[in-house]
Amino acid sequence: MILLIEPDKDIRKKLCDLLCRERIIAIGTRSETLEMICRFKNRFNIIIANINLLLGMIMQGTLFRLCQKLDVDIPPILGLYSEADESAKSEFQKYFKQYKLIEYDEKNIDFPKLYISEVRGFYPAVIADVNKAKEIWLQKEEPQDLIDPRKWLEEEGFLEPRQKEQTEYDGKEIEEFIPSFEKRIADEEREVVNDENDNNYKDLFLEYKRKYNELLQYVNELTQLAQN
C-alpha cells in the first residue's frame, strides 16, 4: 500500500492514475499524514511526498517521532518536486542526500516510466503497468476518484457526512466529536445492561466501543505529538 502526500488535488489524482491498480491513500496535509500513519502503521510499503511537506516534517522531526512513538518502521520515502520547487530541492538535498527525489513534469512523456521505476525500486511488488500508465498520461483522461481519508470515519459512524466540501482537513473535527460520542457510548451501555438477553446487540455494542477506543488512541497520539 502507498501513502501519497501532495497538496495539489489534480496532481494527486494524476499520480494515482499512473498506479491505478495499486491501493493508494492520497492526502494533502501534514495532519492527515500523521493520522494515516497512526491508522495504518506498518501497512505502508512506501511514502511518496511533495518535497515542501516532506522537508517540513523531516526538519522538525515530526515523522520520525511519530513512528518512534508508535514503534513502527519508517517506510521508504520518495520525494516529488516540480520546476517551481528548486529552492526547496536545493535545501532538501543539502541536508538529506540519502532520500531519492523525482521531478514531476506534465510535459515529460517519459514521466510515467520514470515514476513507476522509482517506486518499484523501493517497492518491488508494486502493481503497475507502464504501457497503460503512459497511455493514460498522454490521453489526459479524467483521473479516478481517490480514497477519502475521512471516509472510513463516516462509514464506521464516527462522523456525520460532510454537508459541504472542505478545502483542508485540520484535525479539529475529530477532537470535537469525542464528547458527544462518549455520551452515545454511555447511553448505549446502559441499554445493554438493561437488556442482558440480547447477545447480538451486546456484540455490536462492544465492537462499536472497540472502534471508538481505537480512534481515541489515535487522536491522543496526534495531540501529544503536536504538543512536543
Image (spheres, helix red, strand yellow):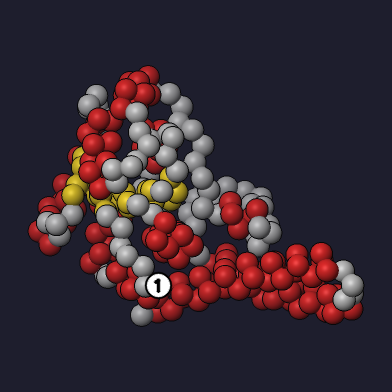
Query: Splitting the image into 4 quarters, where does residue 190 fall?
Result: bottom right
Q: What amino acid is found at the position of numbered circle 1 in the picture?
A: Leu
Q: Report the residue at 73% width, 74% height from top.
A: 185
Compare residues 202 and 180 and report the one nearer the observer: 202
Q: Secondary structure at mark 1?
A: helix
Residue 196 visible within the image: yes
Query: Splitting the image into 4 quarters, where does residue 118 fall?
Result: top left
Image x and y of residue 139, in percent: 37, 19
User: Looking at the image, how many numbered discs can be counted on the residues?
Assistant: 1
Q: Residues within 10 Å of mark 1 (few under 14, many from 20)?
A: some
Q: Which residue is mark 1?
A: 70
Query: Splitting the image into 4 quarters, where does residue 194 fall?
Result: bottom right
Image x and y of residue 141, in percent: 43, 23
Q: Report the residue at 39% width, 41% height from top.
A: 12
Which quarter of the image is occupied by the C terminus? bottom left
Q: Report the residue at 27% width, 55% height from top.
A: 76
Image x and y of residue 43, in percent: 42, 56
User: On the rendered structure, is 54 left or right of 195?
Assistant: left
Image: 20 above or below 38:
above
Residue 14 visible within the image: no
User: On the rendered structure, is 9 left or right of 68?
Assistant: right
Q: Report the residue at 38% width, 54% height from top.
A: 44
